[in-house]
Image (cartoon, rainbow, N blue to C red):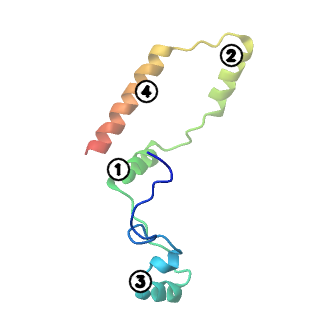
Amino acid sequence: MKINNLPDKPAGAATGAGKPADRLPAANTQRNEAAGDAGVTVSLSATSQTISASVARAGGDVFNAQKVQAIKSAIENGTFTINSEAIADKLLSNARDMLGVAAK
């Protein structure tokens, strides 16, 4: 595919090229101007709501300063070991959980 290959359609015909205000119907433009800074309504998908609820249920901080300091000290002392099998198991478990939530 060449970069310079352009469709035979005039610019803006199907792609909506041009200024954003040019693409809005007149009624929407007037309503948006009248609304001012009224805000935008946002709704979360069921998956996002489920994830947010599970994070809220977990409670507490995700960051544990004492644990971070212990790991930092172990790294400095050369005694820090990594259990790659435990990390792999947790990654697979999290992936299964996420896919299960997304499939529902």
Q: Which mark's residue is nearer the viewer, 4 or 3? A: 3
Residue under circle 3?
Answer: 25
Residue shown at 43% from the left, 66% from the top: 42
The image shows residue 21, relative to residue 98, as above or below, that is below
Rate crowding at label 2 as few (under 14), some (14 to 19) or many (20 or more) other CA atoms within 10 Å: few
The Cα–Cα distance between marks 3 and 1, rounded to whole angstroms, is 33 Å
Looking at the picture, tell me which residue is in the foreground, 5 or 62: 5
Residue under circle 2?
Answer: 74
Looking at the picture, tell me which residue is in the foreground, 48 or 54: 48
Residue under circle 1?
Answer: 47
Looking at the picture, tell me which residue is in the foreground, 11 or 71: 11
- Say which quadrant the N terminus sits in: top left
The disc, 4 or 1, on the residue closer to the chain's N-terminal end is: 1
Amino acid of disc 1: Thr
Amino acid of disc 4: Leu
Which numbered marker is on residue 91?
4
Residue shown at 61% from the left, 34% from the top: 64
Q: Which mark's residue is nearer the viewer, 3 or 2? A: 3
- Say which quadrant the C terminus sits in: top left
What kind of element bears circle 3?
loop
